[in-house]
Image (cartoon, helix red, strand yellow):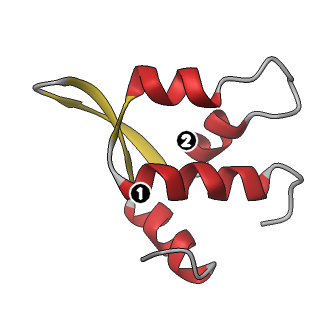
């Protein structure tokens, strides 16, 4: 992790790892108007989180890559 936003990406992945979140909640919570803080986009582009359809609607979950990141950073319970 070398970019300035990486700690925030790690925070996002950890937050989602606690429980899959509705897509709308993730976007509302992690939306930013700063073009340099692309936290959600970075997490998706790096394969740490994914959107998955469920009976309740679109959910965001942590991928295997995201789980590996959390373990490597000592943040996976």
Labels 2, 1: front one: 1
User: Residue at position x 43%, y 20% from top?
Assistant: 24
User: Residue at position x 33%, y 50% from top?
Assistant: 19
Circle 1 SS class: helix
The quarter in which the N terminus is drawn is bottom right
- List x then y, in percent, for residue 71: 51, 80
Circle 2 SS class: helix
Asked if disc 2 and disc 1 are in contact, CB closer than 8 Å, the reply is no
Q: Nearer the viewer, residue 41 or 12?
A: 12
Read off the residue under disc 2: 44
Q: Is residue 59 left or right of residue 10?
A: left
Q: CA distance from mark 2 to mark 1?
A: 14 Å
- List x then y, in percent, for residue 10: 65, 58
- List x then y, in percent, for residue 45: 60, 42
- List x then y, in percent, for residue 8: 73, 50
Read off the residue under disc 1: 17
Q: Is residue 35 left or right of residue 31?
A: right
Q: Is residue 51 above or below residue 62?
A: above
**Residue 34 in view (yes/no):** yes
The local crowd at label 2, few if under 14, some if 14 to 19, many if 20 or more residues have their Cα within 10 Å, is some
**Residue 48 in view (yes/no):** no
Q: Quadrant of residue 18?
A: bottom left
User: Residue at position x 44%, y 49% from top?
Assistant: 16
């Amino acid at each position: 992790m070398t970019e300035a936003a990486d700690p925030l990406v790690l925070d996002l992945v950890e937050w989602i790892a606690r429980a899959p979140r509705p897509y709308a909640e993730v976007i509302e919570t992690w939306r930013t108007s700063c073009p340099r803080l692309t936290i959600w986009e970075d997490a998706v582009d790096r394969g740490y989180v994914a959107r998955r359809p469920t009976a309740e609607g679109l959910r965001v979950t942590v991928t295997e890559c995201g789980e590996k990141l959390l373990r490597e950073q000592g943040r996976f319970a």
